[in-house]
């Protein structure tokens, strides 16, 4: 246990109020290596003392909601570094917080992709339960590896980052996977049938998931190779203008899926047929099923989304960290009261499961190679940002040799994780950014809390009744929850773009990239009839590859931004007055604040001079 203020002053750093973001803080493990008690004494102290169980953490600040017009002085909580020991109760509470912060995001891609619709796999409930369980188990296992970190024998390279970083199924999997599945239904690789009322029924297509896994594992080799490259090369390859634009389009493409689920689902009921089993969502056999876009579905999704926002306004630190889960619970309570919660799948689910209980037929789908290469590159970009933030929040340097070693280990671990997750029958698992927010507000970066979270993920995955319960949640609840989660992905892109200087060149690149990227997302079949249809399998495979690339919004946005960033000439230097007039958004706000601060400083100086 280490007090953050004591750390700063004991190593003779600048005043904490100076808050220099460029200053490099020594690794915490170096600071406290001489003060660690022996293992036996430390274990005895932890088990037999009140301090070992509870410590002096401000639990009240963690749980106290924000009440308007009521000011409460909050005690400065103790800072726990990556290698600091923690009180037992606090470690469990922090682990639960991290678990609740990431669990909804981990299961969401699997729940959506395995569900109904022309872009999803339409799998049976038993297979979907297994897939959700596997995603939780693999996320827990890869989190443990990422957190512990070890050096590869007889090399200078590392595996893992050694910080509190939880791994989970990446949202970047979704756009490319759905584009591939949609293409496979169109060209006959996945089966369909026409019902008596003319509605197209998309039949289960587990082989498509095997193709997704096989292709993604092949493409993940690129991540492993790139992980050994110097960090400066990676930053030049993926500048802010590219990464920000890609994340905005990914968020937009995911939001469409969330909105469809909010209204009732992504299956055949979206067309609102007047007869047949899809008159209601998800079908007429579901308990108290409603028509797609009905007022009840709208109200349920609104209740979930509104609860999340209400928690952000009034909730305590703990509640804000788990606001998505609280919204999910509120939605489940409402749908249970309305009789929409189907518990039959929970009753029939096995008590426990594990990896490889079910398997998929692996294959390489050539049209999906380029889309998944972009997906893997995007995962690597996300990993760089997440690990940099984790290092900063943990009080460790964000440049220099130690930082580059951590980044190399983290990127390598993510690349291998994508391959291992594919072998375990789940989509690519990489580091998550959700838990960085928990670290920031709780002042706890101890890896012990991360290990608690990882074990909770594994336990929830093994006991398949939990997965069955998650799959039984009605679509409007999932839609209201995922709308908030997916919009956060786009918001991350906006935040990155906010760091641009917004010169004319920047505006042209972003505008052109978003024009095509968002346009493709809004009208995904605009290119469907451009390429010819042929009986030659090789030629048709090539045409399908082009269709998949052009009809995937974030790939087009990434390609256009990369090409324009290379070929557009740089703007010449402008006078300061012109630069000031061209500022907008966050840059204008920051500039005005800095100018106001300068005026105040000058006025104070003149006032002191006059008084003398």
Image: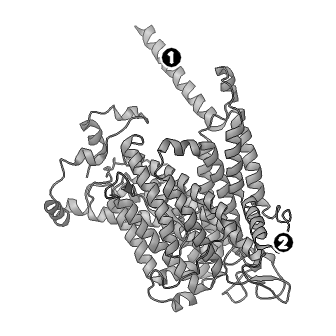
What colouring method underlies this structural image?
one colour
Query: Against 472, is 437 above or below?
Result: above
Describe residue 182's horizontal placement relative to residue 611 as left or right: right
Q: Is residue 499 above or below residue 591?
A: below
Q: Tell which of 168 and 96 is nearer to you.
A: 168
For the C terminus, the image quarter is top left
The numbered disc on residue 534 is: 2
| Left or right relative to 304: residue 601 | left
Task: Provide residue 562's location: percent of width, then percent of height.
Answer: 67, 46
Disc 1 residue crowd, few under 14, some 14–19, many 20+, Cα 10 Å: few
Asked whether residue 486 is in view, the answer is yes
Q: Quadrant of residue 504?
A: top right
What kind of element bears circle 1? helix
All told, the count of numbered labels is 2
Tell me what residue is drawn at x 66 percent, y 25 percent: 579
- Residue at (55%, 67%) from the top-left corner? 217
Res. 254 mark: none
Q: Is residue 488 left or right of residue 295?
A: left
Taking 50 as reference, is 579 left or right?
Answer: right
The residue most toward the bottom is 348
Secondary structure type for disc 2: loop
- Residue named by callout 1: 603
Image coords of residue 371 (percent x, y): 66, 61
- Res 342 seen here: no
> Picture coordinates of residue 558 (x, y %)?
67, 51
Rendered residue at 56%/77% (across/down): 333
Instruction: Give the image location of residue 270, x and y in percent.
Output: 77, 75
Badge 1 or badge 2: first in the primary sequence: 2
Query: Which is nearer the eye, 96 or 413?
Result: 413
Q: Nearer the viewer, residue 193 or 284?
A: 193
């Amino acid at each position: 246990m280490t007090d953050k203020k004591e750390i700063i002053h004991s190593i003779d750093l600048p005043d904490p109020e100076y808050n220099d973001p460029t200053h490099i803080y020594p690794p915490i493990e170096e600071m406290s290596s001489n003060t660690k008690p022996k293992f036996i004494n430390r274990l005895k102290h932890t088990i037999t003392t009140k301090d070992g169980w509870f410590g002096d953490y401000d639990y009240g600040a963690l749980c106290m909601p924000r009440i308007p017009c009521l000011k409460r002085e909050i005690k400065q909580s103790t800072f726990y570094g990556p290698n600091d020991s923690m009180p037992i109760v606090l470690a469990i509470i922090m682990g639960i917080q991290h678990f609740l912060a990431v669990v909804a995001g981990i299961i969401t891609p699997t729940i959506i992709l395995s569900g109904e619709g022309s872009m999803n796999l339409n799998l049976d409930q038993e297979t979907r339960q297994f897939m959700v369980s596997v995603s939780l188990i693999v996320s827990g296992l890869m989190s443990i590896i990422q957190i512990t970190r070890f050096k590869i024998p007889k090399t200078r390279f590392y595996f893992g980052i050694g910080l509190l970083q939880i791994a989970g199924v990446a949202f970047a999997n979704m756009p490319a996977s759905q584009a591939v599945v949609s293409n496979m239904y169109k060209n006959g690789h996945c089966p369909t049938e026409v019902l008596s009322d003319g509605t197209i029924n998309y039949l289960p297509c587990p082989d498509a998931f095997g193709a997704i896994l096989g292709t993604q594992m092949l493409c993940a080799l690129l991540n492993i190779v790139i992980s050994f490259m110097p960090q400066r090369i990676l930053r030049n390859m993926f500048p802010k203008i590219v990464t920000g634009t890609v994340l905005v389009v990914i968020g937009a493409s995911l939001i469409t899926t969330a909105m469809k689920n909010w209204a009732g689902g992504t299956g055949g009921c979206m067309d609102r047929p007047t007869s047949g089993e899809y008159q209601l969502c998800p079908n007429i056999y579901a308990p108290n099923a409603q028509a797609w876009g009905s007022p009840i579905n709208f109200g349920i999704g609104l209740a979930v989304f509104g609860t999340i926002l209400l928690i952000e306004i009034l909730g305590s630190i703990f509640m804000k960290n788990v606001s998505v889960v609280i919204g999910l619970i509120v939605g489940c309570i409402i749908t249970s009261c309305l009789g929409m919660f189907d518990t039959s799948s929970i009753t029939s689910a096995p008590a426990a499961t594990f990896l490889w209980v079910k398997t998929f037929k692996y294959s390489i789908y050539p049209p999906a190679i380029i889309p998944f290469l972009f997906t893997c590159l995007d995962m690597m970009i996300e990993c760089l940002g997440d690990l940099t933030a984790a290092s900063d929040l943990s009080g460790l340097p964000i440049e220099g040799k130690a930082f580059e070693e951590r980044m190399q280990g983290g990127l390598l671990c993510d690349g291998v994780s994508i391959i291992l997750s594919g072998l375990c029958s789940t989509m690519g698992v990489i580091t998550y950014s959700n838990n960085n927010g928990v670290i920031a507000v709780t002042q706890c970066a101890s890896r012990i809390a991360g290990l608690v979270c990882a074990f909770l993920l594994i336990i929830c995955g093994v006991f398949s009744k939990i997965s069955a319960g998650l799959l039984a949640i009605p679509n409007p609840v999932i839609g209201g929850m995922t709308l908030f989660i997916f919009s956060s992905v786009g918001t991350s892109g906006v935040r990155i773009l906010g760091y641009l200087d917004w010169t004319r060149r920047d505006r042209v690149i972003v505008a052109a990239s978003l024009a095509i990227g968002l346009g493709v997302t809004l009208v995904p079949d605009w290119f469907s009839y451009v390429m010819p249809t042929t009986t030659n399998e090789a030629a048709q495979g090539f045409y399908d590859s082009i269709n998949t690339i052009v009809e995937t919004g974030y790939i087009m946005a990434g390609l256009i931004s990369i090409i324009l960033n290379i070929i557009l000439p740089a703007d010449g230097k402008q006078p300061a007055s012109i630069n000031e007039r061209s500022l907008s958004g966050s840059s204008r706000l920051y500039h005005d604040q800095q100018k106001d601060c300068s005026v105040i400083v000058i006025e104070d100086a003149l006032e002191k001079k006059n008084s003398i």
